[in-house]
Image (spheres, rainbow, N blue to C red):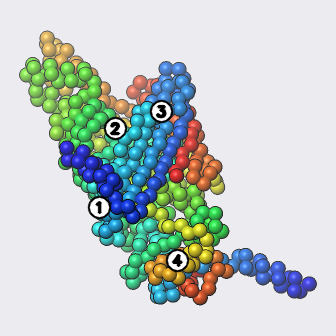
Amino acid sequence: MIQKIALLVFVLSFGVQADIAVIVNPANANVVSADDLNRLFLGRASSFADGSKATPLNLSEGQVARDEFDSKVLNRSSAQLKAYWSKLVFTGKGTPPKEMADDAAVKAAVAADPNAIGYISSGSVDGTVKVVTTF
Amino acid sequence: MLKKSLIAFAVSGLLIAPAHAEVQINGFASIKAGMTLDSDDELYGYTNDLDFKNESLMALQVRSDLGEKLSVTAQLMGRGSNDFDIGFEWAFITYQLNDNTMINAGRLRGPFYKYSEYKDVGYAYDWSRVPRSVYGLGFDNIEGISVYRTDIIAGFDSTLIAMYGGYDGTTGLGDGQLDGFFGASWELSRDWYNFRIAYYNADASLTFANQDANNLLGALNANGFAALAEEIDFDKDKGTFFGIGAGIDRENLVIVAEYNRTEVDNTLFANRENYFISVAYRLGSITPYISHEWERHDSKPEIYQPYQNLASTPLAPLYFGAVATVESQAKEADTLNIGLRYDFHSSAAFKLQYTSQKNKLLDTRVGLLVAGVDLVF
């Protein structure tokens, strides 16, 4: 019984705890704030605090972490974000971050590129990438 | 000539793009059906017969990254009101000077209003159409060069667009041209609120679409009233546009307001003041909204008043012709819009909008109902 309750508590707490990890290449020593993430993923900035180029990588639509990231970090629904990007795309002012198929693809790309920044479900994190913040 | 060659240059850029160039193809479309609610009533091109073409459009954008910070973009659009004939709505090359600065050259959209650059991309806003009586210059595009710059200033995200160029084509009053067009738009936004200011000017010339007005100018010149003709016609006369706007977007409440003033010195062009306010509230995937537009075009009686002695002479027809022509520019109208946007699909929105416009000079009212789908791909 107690084991079952403990398991239940674990599952519930896992559900509400930080479940998105923002990841960069282990060689990247920059601090990344929520404001920085907003600017990078909305196309309003393209470099890290130290001035090096930043390449944001999105998850494709429909991935769980994508919805979480859109609503928790960017504070917008996916329809609002699509409207936002269509303003920039069709006026020649910007292009949305490249979309990757899943956590594994984002992780592999970040592990291979010192300029990349992405986000994945916390459970997918391993030693090939560095977590800068969680949500 | 310069303008045509700029477009040709931009388009040739697309054609000579190296084989490895990254090419993005995007598009948007709107399919709108609408009709006015009373026979004989007309508004925004709609009549009392249900129409599927008037505000429908399709556009395809091709952007090719040529490397070395250079890219080329062409947007081809077909409007239902023009039988879906395809034309280049935008065609420009972009040079990314640095992280914050972009230089565009070619055919661009004049950034007069908050929504003017993407007014054709219905998916990008909640209304069925941008507030038309406020966005009423009668032309959209400028051929020339622009600088687009983003900064962070005292915690605000700053967006500055400065533009120089010209225009040659149809306007609200007839075929014409703008020379030496220049000015800038500046927007500041932070968290949930934003401000905007814009100023542009140019030398305007045109031939009136209204033949009576052209005949009047001929008669005035022939009878020794060239000075009066000059006060009416557009012959490199200085036009100025000034606009301000503000918006908030907080906890699903979206409020936007804009005001603008347009004047063209030494022409019959009325002093135009237009403004609107819009309030929308997001309820999940449904966003109901209400907006009100005010259109105030004050005619310029000071043009013909010095000549009122003519009224009792054989030249009276010239005087009354001038009065009628100048006064034809007066307008006072209020427009109410009520509607909703429904995001029924991840790339498409359904919209329904009722518009009621009251012409306060004629004391008439027209109702219009439009439903449709805006999508991006």
Give the chain of mark 1: B
Indicate the position of residue B89 as horizontal and vertical percent values.
Answer: 36, 45
Callout 1: SS:
strand
Q: Nearer the viewer, residue B202 or B109?
A: B109
Q: Amino acid at mark 2?
A: Gly
Corner quadrant of residue B141: top left
Q: Amino acid at mark 1?
A: Ile
**Could you tell which of marks 1 and 2 lies nearer the N-terminus?**
1
Name the residue that disc number 3 marks: B54
Name the residue that disc number 2 marks: B138
Q: Nearer the viewer, mark 4 or mark 1?
A: 4
Q: CA distance from mark 1 to mark 2?
A: 26 Å
Callout 3: SS:
loop
Give the chain of mark 4: A
Q: Are marks 4 and 2 on the same chain?
A: no
Q: Amino acid at mark 4?
A: Ala
| Residue farthest toward the front in the current orientation of the protein | B19
Residues marked 3 and 4 touching at CB (< 8 Å) = no
